[in-house]
Amino acid sequence: MTRSSQGIEPPSDPERFTLPFATPQVLATEERDGVLVTYERELPGAPLRGGAGNKPPARDLPAHETDALLTVLRGLASVPGSPAMRRLTVQGDDRPLWDGHIRFPDALAALVERAARRHGDVLAAAVPGWTAGVERVTEALRALPDTPVTAVHGDLVPPNVHVDDAGVPVAVLDFGFFTTVADPAFEAAVTAAIWDMYGPDAEHHTAELTSLFAEALGYDAKVLALYQAAYALTTYDLFSRDGSDGHFHWCAALLNRHTVTD
């Protein structure tokens, strides 16, 4: 039994879209004490990095890890966006991400502006020039060309990617944190940024994966960096309102070293 943050079945179905890995399937739902509880099928495999969070990854990520990530990113990017996906909200927001928009860059820019109004004063204290940075990010987003959109998981971290004994991805789970339909480059950008957030080589790993995804998947590295800044600006306050948590400090650090917001 698992508790779903949104109570919505993940948008991808391996049988319908012939994904190379399994995804959650909601078998039943019920409400308990005001919380929507979902019953889901058990997924195979084990977390890609055993003991993730306890032992930091090596400075040079192993090939089986990066190969698995590329497989997952390519798989999710093969799932076309649907009208139902466009009705999803993302964590911390009060309306569907796509509400009133027909282009993902515009929808994301509007989300950045809404998130800035939530607790922007807290972020402003940690990120000098924050107000101008928000304006630059939203302007840059709206200047992006329109692209085909696909299913986005939004939280691809080691515990959410399961592999078999050979290191091949067999399941992707825990949809809901930033699940939506979007430019698949957004998924790649966020994954590169959050795969290792707190290890001693975290910044190096973000750069390593951003470069890898740009080369292997054909994404513009500058667009990936822009999406990473947008992710930080839209999730900075999801774990505390006063900036006292680690995720807030991670977001502030990313924005302080970002060329778009600097």
Image (cartoon, grey):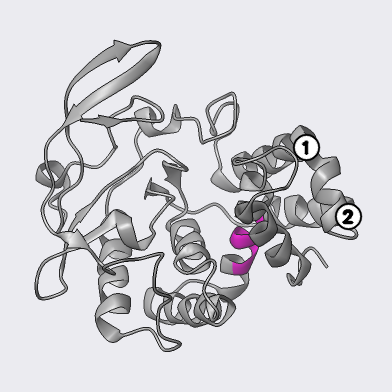
Q: Residue 43 at what x, y percent from top left? A: 13, 47
Q: Residue at x 27, y 62 (%)?
A: 72
Q: Which residue is at the far bottom? A: 60
Q: Amino acid at mark 2?
A: Ala
Which residue was labeled with disc 1?
119
* 227 or 35: nearer the viewer: 35
Q: Residue 54 at what x, y percent from top left? A: 39, 67
Marks 1/2: CA distance?
16 Å
Give the left or right position of residue 166, taking residue 35 as reference: left
Q: Residue 25 at what x, y percent from top left? A: 17, 35
Using the image, determine if residue 62 lies above or below residue 168.
Answer: below
Which residue was labeled with disc 2?
132
Residue extent of the magenta highlight: 225-230
Asked if the residue at tag 2 contacts the one at tag 1, i.e. Cβ–Cβ closer than 8 Å, the answer is no
Q: Residue 226 in magenta?
A: yes
Q: Residues within 10 Å of mark 1 (few under 14, many from 20)?
A: some
Q: Residue at x 69, y 50 (%)?
A: 233
* 158 or 94: nearer the viewer: 158
Where residue 116 sits, quadrant-wise, is: top right
